[in-house]
Amino acid sequence: MTHPTARPPAGRLVLAGLASAALTAALALTARPIRTPHPRPELSPADTAASAPAQPTRRPHVALAEFRSRDPDLTAPPPPRERQVARRFLDVFVRYEVGDVSFTVRRGLRSTAIPRLADELLQAPPRLPDRDMPRPARVLALEARGADATGAEFEALLARRGAPRAVLTLTLETRRGRPYVSALR
């Protein structure tokens, strides 16, 4: 029988001490320092006017769009209106590709593409065998390549069942204040 105030054997103390030290070291390595916000200095209106840049600064996404497009004329991100038109065009174009030339598809192509492109597409619709009616492609991504005052360029990633993914480049131009798809590649 052991005495209630008896000490545990020395081996147990060393093992408990090592476990405690390992736990403390692990917590110290994984703990993140607490960041306190630094107070910002107050600036007078005269200081802010003097420190304002003389030229507008370049935004990182603009430089990225310029880098991706490799075209120095396409430097700004396109407005949301161009993206909406490109998306609406793609929605009807993937249906057109599988032979759907219904009223809805024709109206969608005519409302989102310039007349010359819409006429070219509708004059010679794709002819597919009746028994193997494929499903329309899905638009996986629509990425802006850049924009300027007269238009924008987008790349769309299309996925079809049983076929490799395809990239379609849309060029949009502004006519009478509205964007229209003017070219496909």
Image (tube, rainbow, N blue to C red):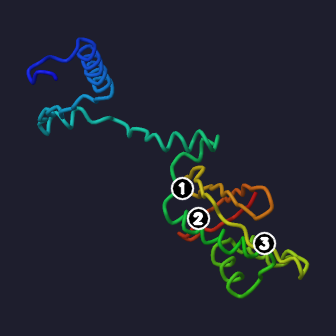
SS under mark 2? strand
Q: Is residue 31 above or below residue 8?
A: below
Work out which residue is located at the far left of the displayed protein and give it.
5
Work out which residue is located at the far bottom of the displayed protein and give it.
103
Marks 2 and 1: CB-CB under 8 Å? yes
Tell me which label, 2 or 1, sits earlier in the chain. Answer: 1
Figure disc tally? 3
Which residue carries the number 2 mark? 174
Q: Is residue 113 left or right of residue 57?
A: right
Displayed quadrant of residue 68: top right
C-alpha separation, residue under disc 2 versus residue under disc 1: 8 Å
Mark 3: amino acid: Glu
Q: Residues within 10 Å of mark 1 (few under 14, many from 20)?
A: few
Image quadrant in which the C terminus is located: bottom right
Displayed quadrant of residue 73: top right
Q: Is residue 98 above or below residue 38?
A: below
Which residue corresponds to the image point at 37% horizontal and 37% vertical from the top-left? Answer: 55
Front residue of 125 and 157: 157
Which residue carries the number 1 mark? 149
SS under mark 1? loop
Q: Residue 182, image x and y in percent?
A: 69, 64
